[in-house]
Image (cartoon, rainbow, N blue to C red):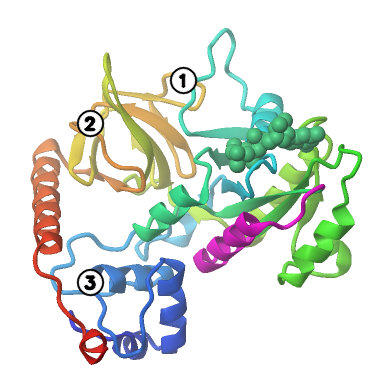
Amino acid sequence: EPGATVRDLGEALGVPPTRIIQILMGLGEMKTVTQTLSTEEIELVAEELGRKVEVGTLEEPAPEEVAPEDSPEDLVEKPPVITVMGHVDHGKTSLLDRIRRTNVVSGEAGGITQHIGAYQVEQDGRRITFIDTPGHEAFTEMRARGARVTDIVVLVVAADDGVMPQTEEAIEHARAAGVPIVVAINKIDVPNANPDRVMGELAERGLTPEQWGGETVTVPVSAKTGEGIDDLLENILVVAELEELRANPKAPASGYVIESRLDPGRGPVATLLLNRGTLHRGDVVLAGTAYGRVRAMFDHNGQRIKEAGPGTPVEILGLSGVPEAGTRFEVAENERTARSRAQQAEERLRRQELAQSGPRRTTLEELLG
Ligand code: GTP
Ligand code: MG
């Protein structure tokens, strides 16, 4: 219920309050045991713990890739979704480019590769999805909205530079999100590369490489020469297998908006990442305040497709507006339902804006100075 404190929530969920505080910190919120939580915070914490809570007029239930109603026989393996993170200039973009150039799922014959903010590669006949939204900010922003988009973080560390502040930040983000980390020690081709030193620095931060008897998968690579890239992809698949990433393709489609824009000719264009279910052309999609029938759908190569399953990024046309990155989407029964729910979302947004512009409540701590 609103007014619940960190302690109350801990008791309700049967976890220590320190765990709640830790999760909130991961979402950029500092709270003490006796402070009250907003409905949104309660939802986010619950989701983080893989739980559902009923909070007042909770209109949108926490999304789950594997919902309770999924029967085990409907669950199939889904491609792991990877986010690449790391310090400035350590080679994130180069690595993504290299992976894309050498392994992108074919079907580009004569086509121009379209940039849709996410793409799939194939390794040993299995697909891996990369989200091309670099930077911790995008990651944090999405997490703050409760978006659960990444299954594995690939942490890029330059072999000639080692663990730097943003490397540490990335480690913290991944840990807060409970997402496994695969380390790519990049630039092993440069003369002053020192992968051993990097491994030492990683070990100091609790990421002891497997090569040293630890548990962190660490792969030396060069985005420049291509060395180790296959190895990296294979290791990603191994980690994915351990995570048992499964989803129900028969369920109604849901997932998250990765990016969106207003195209002068085509109207609102959104890249969606499916978590669950199968999305078909003609389905009615609801994403926050935007909704509409999927008029056309494209894969990461810009090829028209009719349907897409879990773990797959797609670009869609037909929405009424441009939903923000990180917004959850789902399929609605029909356009009328979608419209009314989009209007509800709009009203909620207005109320929130009003509340934020209103007088701020003074806390007891502030009064006591
Ligand atoms: P930001 O997006 O600015 O954070 O950088 P980034 O991490 O995306 O790095 P980027 O891929 O732009 O690479 C930075 C520089 O390192 C570029 O000049 C790349 O050519 C170079 N570089 C990246 N990977 C390698 C590598 O494996 N070997 C060598 N020698 N140079 C590399
Ligand atoms: Mg870059």
First reached walking from the N terminus: tag 1 or tag 3: 3
User: Up-down: is 190 above or below 106?
Assistant: below
Q: Which residues are magenta?
A: 160-180
Tell me if I can see residue 123 in this picture: no
Magenta stretch containing residue 58, yes or no?
A: no
Q: Amino acid at mark 2?
A: Leu
User: Up-down: is 281 above or below 51?
Assistant: above
Q: Label 2, label 3: how many angstroms apart (C-alpha)? A: 28 Å
- The quadrant of the rendered image in which ligand 1 is seen is top right
Q: Amino acid at mark 1?
A: Gly
Q: Secondary structure at mark 3?
A: helix
- Residue at image coords 21%, 89%: 364
The numbered disc on residue 319 is 2
Given residues 95 and 245, the one toward you in this image is: 95
Q: x%, y% of residue 190?
A: 86, 38
Q: Amino acid at mark 3?
A: Thr
Q: Secondary structure at mark 2?
A: loop
Q: Are marks 1 and 3 in contact (CB under 8 Å)?
A: no
Mark 2 residue crowding within 10 angstroms, few (<14) / some (14–19) / many (20+): many
Q: x%, y% of residue 338?
A: 14, 42
Given residues 106 and 43, the one toward you in this image is: 43
Q: Label 1, label 2: how many angstroms apart (C-alpha)? A: 18 Å
The rendered magenta stretch, by its main secondary structure, is classed as helix
How many numbered marks have been drawn onto this rendered protein structure?
Answer: 3
First reached walking from the N terminus: tag 1 or tag 2: 1
Quarter occupied by residue 145:
bottom left
* Residue marked by disc 1: 302
